[in-house]
Image (cartoon, rainbow, N blue to C red):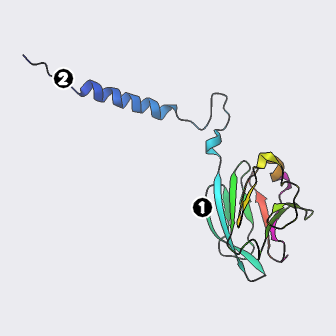
Amino acid sequence: MKKERSIIPIFSLLIIALLFAGCSSSATDANDEPDMEELPEAVITLDNNGAQSYTIINIEGEGAMAELNTENPAITLVPGGRYSFVNESGASAHPLDFRNSDRQKLFGQSRMNGNFNDVDEIDLVMEGDLITFTLTEELAAELADYVCSFHPSMRGDIEIAD
């Protein structure tokens, strides 16, 4: 007599394994600290309107908000997030800089170094028309605006979300 095998026990084990896997994922670890993988990341693409203004043409990802297709809009960022700014107007024609409220350069595409150029925690990357950084609490406390270093009317506020 041939013994028949049932697939029901295997199927049941698979369902139980999937249920446990779904229950174990969380945005916090055992110490209730945020999961670093859950921090926002966004790519903000901007262009220019001649020498008078920047325009945000696209935002992809989480943690950045701005009114699209308007001149020099305020940009809201969430502390702890990683942000990339793509300067479609070109770093050589319209260098994008980030400043504090005293109009001191923190970092950016103009030739002069800023106060945060060498701060390891922000992990600043500048490649051609791209600037990428992590918005640390220290940087969030300082960051006030973005500006074209050649054309001061190309300027918008940066607001920090609570």
Residue 39 lies in the magenta-colored region: no
| Residue at numbered disc 2 | 5
- Residue 95: image quadrant is bottom right
Query: In which quadrant of the rendered image does the N terminus lie?
Result: top left
Examine the image and state in which quarter residue 84 appears. Answer: bottom right
Magenta range is: 141-153
> Which amino acid type corresponds to the residue marked 2 in the rendered image?
Arg
Residue at the spot x=20%, y=25% of the render? 6
Vertical placement of residue 48 versus 13, above or below? below
Q: Amino acid at mark 1?
A: Glu
Q: Position of residue 23 (x, y in %)?
A: 48, 32
| Residue appearing at x 71%, y 66% in the figure | 128
The spot of residue 3 in percent (x, y) is 13, 18
110 or 41: which is nearer to us?
A: 110
Asked whether, in this view, residue 104 is left or right of residue 70, the answer is: right
Residue sitting at the far right: 102
Where's residue 126, x and y in %? Answer: 74, 60
Q: Nearer the viewer, residue 52 or 106?
A: 106
Which label number is shown at residue 88? none
Mark 2 surroundings: few (<14), some (14-19) or many (≥20) residues within 10 A: few
Kind of element beneath mark 2: loop
- Vertical placement of 108 versus 12: above or below? below
Figure disc tally? 2
* Depicted 61 relative to depicted 57: above or below: above
* 20 lies left or right of 33: left
Q: Which residue is mark 1?
A: 60
